[in-house]
């Protein structure tokens, strides 16, 4: 471990150490995705969405429908909650 790495580890808060410890137990793909988010936050870079193209399209459609005032009726929502068992 280099001197910089040692200094970084020593400077971590207990909460960050706990989080890193948990992240190390995740599959490599999840570790990489979360590391990317942490690096973006640390660098004050804009957040890049981890949504699939299909999910991004669904979000855009939902935004468009909301902008157009297209919302579910109370009856549609009640039916949805009932189907979900809530």
Image (cartoon, rainbow, N blue to C red):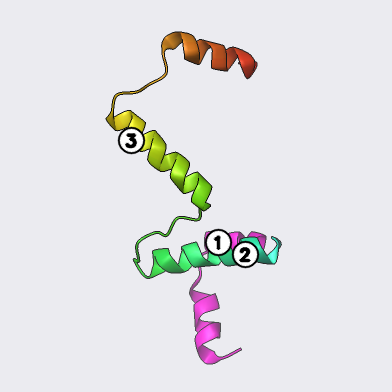
| Element type at mark 1 | helix
Determine whether, in the image, residue 16 is placed left or right of residue 24: left
Q: Is residue 42 visible?
A: yes
Whole-Å distance between the Cαs marked 2 and 3?
Answer: 33 Å
Q: Residue at x 40, y 34 (%)?
A: 62
Circle 3 SS class: helix
Taking the magenta stretch, the answer to whether it contains residue 20 is yes
Q: At numbered mark 2, what does the secondary structure look like: helix, strand or loop?
A: helix
Are the residues flagged by discs 2 and 3 in contact, CB closer than 8 Å? no
Mark 1: give few (<14), some (14-19) or many (20+) Cα within 10 Å: some
Name the residue beneath numbered marker 1: 34
Q: Which residue is rendered at x = 45% and y = 55% of the image?
A: 49
Q: Is residue 76 left or right of residue 65?
A: right
- Magenta region: which residues? 1-23
2 vs 3, front mark: 3
Instruction: Using the image as rendered, state which of residue 15 and residue 54 is in the foreground.
Output: 54
Dividing the image into 4 quarters, which one contains the N terminus? bottom right
Q: Position of residue 32 (x, y in %)?
A: 59, 67
Q: Residue furthest bottom?
A: 2
| Residues at discs 2 and 1 in contact (Cβ within 8 Å) | yes
- Whether residue 78 appears in magenta in the rendering, the answer is no
Report x, y in % for residue 20.
60, 64
Tell me which label, 3 or 1, sits earlier in the chain.
Answer: 1
Magenta span: chief secondary structure = helix
* Residue denoted by label 2: 31
| Mark in front: 3 vs 1 | 3
Q: Nearer the viewer, residue 72 or 20?
A: 72
Quarter location, residue 6: bottom right
The span from disc 2 to disc 1 (Cα, nearest Å) is 5 Å
Q: Which residue is mark 3?
A: 64
Q: Quadrant of the C terminus?
A: top right
């Amino acid at each position: 471990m280099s001197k910089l790495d040692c200094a970084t580890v020593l400077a971590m808060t207990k909460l960050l150490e706990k989080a890193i410890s948990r992240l190390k137990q995740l599959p490599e793909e999840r570790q990489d995705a979360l590391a990317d988010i942490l690096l973006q936050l640390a660098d004050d870079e804009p957040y890049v969405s981890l949504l699939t193209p299909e999910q991004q399209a669904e979000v855009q459609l939902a935004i468009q429908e909301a902008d157009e005032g297209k919302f579910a009726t109370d009856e549609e929502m009640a039916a949805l909650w009932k189907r979900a068992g809530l």
